[in-house]
Amino acid sequence: MSPAVAYLRRAVELLAQETLVIGDAVAALGTLVEDLGPMLQAVVRPSEPAFARADVARLPRTDDVADVELTLAADAVVSLEELSAAFGLGQDASGLHHGARSERLFMPIPATPAHAGCALFATLVGGRVTKLLLRRDPPL
Amino acid sequence: MSEHEGARPAAAATAEVATANVQAVPAAPTLQRQSAVRQIHRSLQAWRSPSAEGEGDEGESAEGGDKADEGEVAPEATAQTETPDEAAPKVAAKRQGSSARGGRIGSSTVRQALRKVMRSTTPPPGTTPAGPNAEQLAQMRSLELAADAIKKRNQAILAASAGGVPGPEAMHASAQITQFVAAAKTIFKDWDMYQTPEARIRMMAFAASDTLTAAGVPTPVVVADDAETSFRAGAWRLSISKQSYSAKPANEDKAANIASTVYHEARHAEQYFNVARMLAGKGKNATEIAAEVPGGIPPRIAAEACLKPMPPTDPDCVQFQRILDALRDPATKKLTEDILDKVFAAGRATMAAIAAGRANAPDAQTKSDEAKAAWLIANPLVEQQKRLDPEVDAYGIENLVKAAFKA
């Protein structure tokens, strides 16, 4: 498993925690670059160099983490095959107006009535994974 | 939506020349009220007789140029009021604006693509750009046929929905729009007080959040984005372009565009939520809804929808079923690809020819006529694409907001 996918795995487990506030997520993911404050995201420099940036978004009007979007470094490569091997086959999640972009949705840890989960969206541009968004799903 | 490109490349400076040239062409106000059907006919006329270029193509060019300069290149969604096929998506009285990427609704990929086209059109000094070649002409012919097919599809949608009169959606309510516009105007009025783009975005996010809350829709996550203003259903995330909130809008039109774009994207959230409510009304549970709505809406949003199911007898179900169908429709995606890949190629030729025409190139006028005719043939498709239900609906409400903003 590549360091990037190993980092993703840790991030998935982090987001599947029952509670997770911005400060804890930032500390776990890397170094804070800038916190844009209420309603908006905190920008993080990930500890894994394959990722250039992480945007840690807040649930509206709270300090709880809603999702984390990781932007791959220009020279980094994470393939769909790697993601499938780590998180399952996934499904197409592209919609209208995607243009050159497409999306693939993985469900590494589905939420249940008892447990929180985490979904992973891979954004592809020209066949290359450019961003990975990890959505935190509270228990159903 | 308005997707504002970040850094403008040096080449954009020359492209501005093309834009400025386009702006210099007098616009035809009537074009904005012409139906897609009439546009197609006029396109064909222009195609068959390039010299008989009507005010329509000039108007279209002017429109495109003007909007391109503003970072808003989409042709007016004019056509919303006149013919049954336009009225199809009930939105006849409403209007236009951004984009739906099932799961990832990004406001104007179309506009962004157009803008890029316009920025890449200025020919090198001393050269004359070519008009459309045989292959392009063949493509345009096929697009013309596709436009007819789409018109028929819209007519079928209208026929299927006859008798179902969608009720007023919460975000359509004039009180909602008035409240949002008042909040947005405050942001522009107190622009300097907020000091940073993020602070202004935060205020706009609060305004959108208040609107959605009043409409009973879960507030999206909000992020300040380097590139675009868009709504992404899978993450229930509203991205707002920092570009739009960096420099104070030069005039009321631009301010209205910025505000209405956010409303447009917020409307997509309401669309998705109501689609989820409609499915809940059919007895689906949260897990099923989350899986069934294209783009994979978050389970927490689906769960909220289950608390507010839309009864199957509710007339609004017709509209939201149509929206769901449009989001699932492969033909819709194919059409979008056609527009982005081919129609804008025709537009590129158009703009290049116009730019050359302004430079008095020997055969520029002929080439300009050819290219403009080609553009007109292609353009109805862009208009048809706007009539796809999620977009027509969102563009419709965006126009209401713009009008309220400028009232």
Image: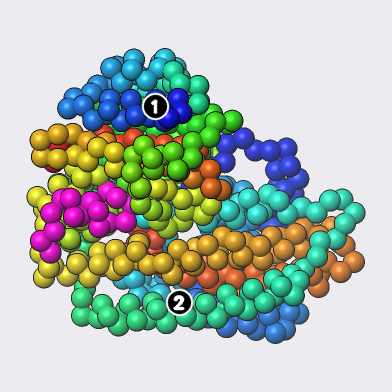
Whether tag 1 and tag 2 are in contact, CB under 8 A, the answer is: no
Judge left or right: residue B162 versus residue B344: left
Q: Which mark is residue B150?
A: 2
User: How many numbered marks appear?
Assistant: 2
Residue A109 included in the magenta stretch of the image: no
Q: Position of residue B407 (x, y in %)?
A: 39, 52
Q: CA distance from mark 1 to mark 2?
A: 47 Å
Type of amino acid under label 1:
Ala
A34 displayed left or right of B134: left
Question: What chain does mark 2 sit on?
Answer: B
Residue at 18% over, 34% down: A116
Give the residue at mark 1: A6
Residue nearest the observer in this picture, B289 or B167: B289
Quarter in which the N terminus of chain A is drawn: top left
Query: Residue B118: horizontal and vertical position, in percent?
Result: 66, 53
> Residue, x 49% and y 49% (percent of image)?
A101
Magenta stretch?
B281-297
